[in-house]
Amino acid sequence: MSEVFVVNSGSSSIKYQLIDLETESSSVGGLIERIGEPGEVPDHTTGMLQVLDSLGGGHDIVAVGHRVVHGGPSFTGPTLITDRVESEIDELSALAPLHNPANVLGIRAARAAMPNVPHVAVFDTAFHQTMPAAAYTYAIDAELAQKYKVRRYGFHGTSHKYVSEEAARFLGRPLEDTKTIVLHLGNGASVTAVDGGKSVDTSMGLTPLQGLVMGSRSGDIDPAVIFHLSREAGLSIDELDVLLNRKSGLLGLTGTGDMRDVQEAASRGNRPALDALAVWRHRIRHYIGAYIATLGGIDALVFTAGIGENNSLLRRRALAGLQFLGIEVDDDRNELQSRHTRYISPEGARVSVLVVPTNEELEIARQAASISM
Ligand code: ADP
């Protein structure tokens, strides 16, 4: 049985899964953490060898799929990793300083441990490379933007692609003829407008900071807030980076970044939690409206990721009062707990509202296999 080894490498962790291409299921998976800390696994190379050792024999690994966060403007699909591709990913680190260097550590370790297998990079940004210039261009000095690669890229692309294709399959509709809005609501969150299987707009930007209210990221903000806080509060650029990426969003508004805790507090009548949920919901509805206009209609609205898959109350609240757009939620269907793709809109509704559990590892395995076999 042919398998793809899927690697998601962080700065101090390696998350991995072995995906069987025939059954499309995962036989083994795990996580190595605290790499580089005293008394722990010293580096990614050692960690990778330990992982491979633990897999034991009997596996036929035909490819390794690497999750890479930023593919910049040049990577538009899964890419066979050569030395040159590896350095290009490293060079893109300026655009994703937390993620790309960590991804490169994993790529180096895995290529060294498995030199005879094709390694494929699957980029979070790739699916969004179909966006038209009108959607990805920021209205700033064009030369400066070109020189420093400043534009909207979008992220969670692997998830948005997988989920929008799964939705069309579930609905029995031709992908080319389906207009879908995907709400990926996890710790990080983004919305994508998908027209005929192609991303035409998405809420994240140059980095994953733009768009929805997230666990600890502010999402959309007037950039002048940064100048204002720099001048008036004396915060440095690095402090503002930390403020907006790690101390904002639900965390900034309530003191906790985990949606379950925010909701629990709200259910007790906690004012900041109730207000944070209102901001969170307002932002989602803003994007739903915008993307229906961009798409010129909507066939399917899909919820996915931690919050989107598991929280019926927030799904219902997010869509309340949108009947005039054909968007409705059936309470019984919405309450049903399931790990499968399902309707939450009522029978015969104009817009199919679905929950589709995302599976980024499977999508990475499919894409890695598609170009290496
Ligand atoms: P990541 O972006 O880290 O991949 P996930 O997609 O796993 O994140 O989503 C994590 C988020 O989902 C957390 O904020 C968690 O609180 C939230 N979450 C998971 N289950 C529920 C639930 N039943 N209700 C509300 N939030 C949930």
Image (tube, rainbow, N blue to C red):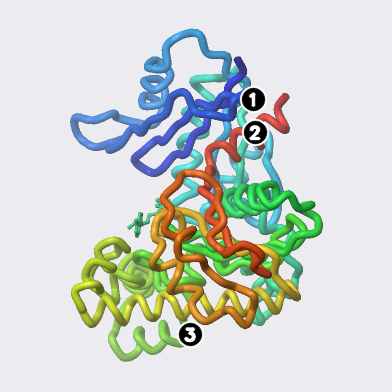
Residue name at image x 66 percent, y 37 percent? 367
Q: Is 188 drawn above or below residue 84 in the view shown?
A: below
Between disc 2 and disc 3, the foreground one is 2
Residue beneath disc 1? 118
For this view, does 32 lie left or right of residue 175? Answer: left
User: Within 10 angstroms of label 3, few (less than 14), some, or many (20 or more) residues?
Assistant: few
- The x and y percentages for residue 212 are 47, 71
Residue 149 appears in the figure: no
Q: Which of 191 and 264 lies nearest the eye of the viewer?
A: 264
What residue did someone put label 2 on?
Answer: 368
> Is the CB of mark 2 within 8 Å of ligand 1?
no
**Hey, which quadrant is residue 37 in on the image?**
top left
Q: Distance between the residues labelled 3 and 1?
A: 44 Å
> Which residue is at 70% across, 45% downward?
77
Give the alpha-carbon distance from disc 2 to disc 1, as whole Å: 9 Å
Give the position of the N terminus as an image quadrant. top right
- Mark 2 vs mark 3, CA separation in Å: 39 Å
Residue 200 point in image, percent of width and height:
71, 65
Displayed quadrant of residue 85: top right
Q: Is mark 3 on a helix, strand or loop?
A: loop
The correct choice, above or below, for 335 with respect to 238 in the image is above
Front position among marks 2 and 1:
2
**Which amino acid does the dot numbered 1 rest on?**
Pro
Residue at the image point whose x is 38% and y is 80% from the top: 278
Return the x and y of residue 338 as percentages of the image width and height.
45, 46
Name the quadrant containing residue 213: bottom left
Q: Mark 2 touching mark 1, by CB under 8 A?
A: yes
Residue at label 3?
222
Q: Is mark 3 within 8 Å of ligand 1?
A: no
